[in-house]
Image: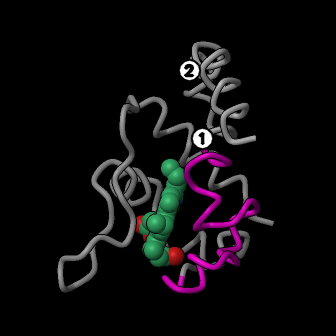
Amino acid sequence: MKNLAFAVILVCGPALAAHAADAKTTWADKCAKCHGAEGKGDTKMGKKLGIKDYSDASVQAGFTDEQAFKALKEGIKDKAGSTRMKAVEDMSDGDINDLVAYVRGLKK
Ligand code: HEC
C-alpha cells in the first residue's frame, strides 16, 4: 500500500504543486498536525507544545497580522533558542498573507 500511495504522489505531483499556494491545502498538509484541522491545537503535537486555541477570539486578539506573518516567515523559537514552529519553506509573501488570512478565518 505504501508503494501505491507513493506512485499516486509521483503521478499527481505536478498537479499538487500547482495548488501548493492554496492556503486551505497548506493548512491541512503542513499546519494541522500541530494546530489541528480547526486550529484548536487539540492534536498530540499541539498539546505537547501548548499551542493555543485559534478558534478562540481572545487568542486571535493576542497577536497582530504582522506578528503572525513574521512567525511564519521566520519561525518561532523559545527563550532557550530551540524551534517551536519552523519557518515556512518555498512560500512567497503573498502565500504567507493568504495563510494569515486563513488562520484569522478559524476564529469562531
Ligand atoms: C511543529 C508544530 C507546528 C506546526 C507544524 C505549525 N505551527 Fe504554528 N505554532 C506552533 C507553536 C508551538 C506556536 C506558538 C504557540 C502558540 O502561540 O499557540 C505557533 C504559533 C502560530 C501562530 C501565532 C503566531 C503569534 O504571533 O502568536 C500562527 C499564526 C501559526 N502558528 C500559524 C501556523 C501555520 C499557518 C502553519 C502551517 C504553515 C503552522 N503554524 C504550523 C507550532 C506549529
Q: CA distance from mark 2 to mark 1?
A: 11 Å
Q: Residue at x 62, y 62 (%)?
A: 33
Give the camera-side residue of 34 and 3: 3
Q: Residue at x 76, y 41 (%)?
A: 1
Residue 35 in the image: above or below residue 73: below
Mark 2 closeness class: few <14, some 14–19, many ≥20 residues within 10 Å: few
Report whether 89 appears left or right of 4.
left
Q: Which residues are magenta?
A: 26-50
Name the kind of residue labelled 1 in the image: Thr
Q: Is mark 1 within 8 Å of ligand 1?
A: yes
Q: What is the number of the mark on residue 26? A: 1
Report whether 30 appears left or right of 3.
left
In percent of width and height, residue 104 lies at 64, 55
Residue 27 belongs to magenta span? yes
Residue furthest to the right in view is: 108
Residue that numbered label 2 is attached to: 17
Mark 1 closeness class: few <14, some 14–19, many ≥20 residues within 10 Å: some
Give the camera-side residue of 43 and 12: 12
Q: What is the number of the mark on residue 52? A: none
In percent of width and height, residue 6 lies at 63, 31
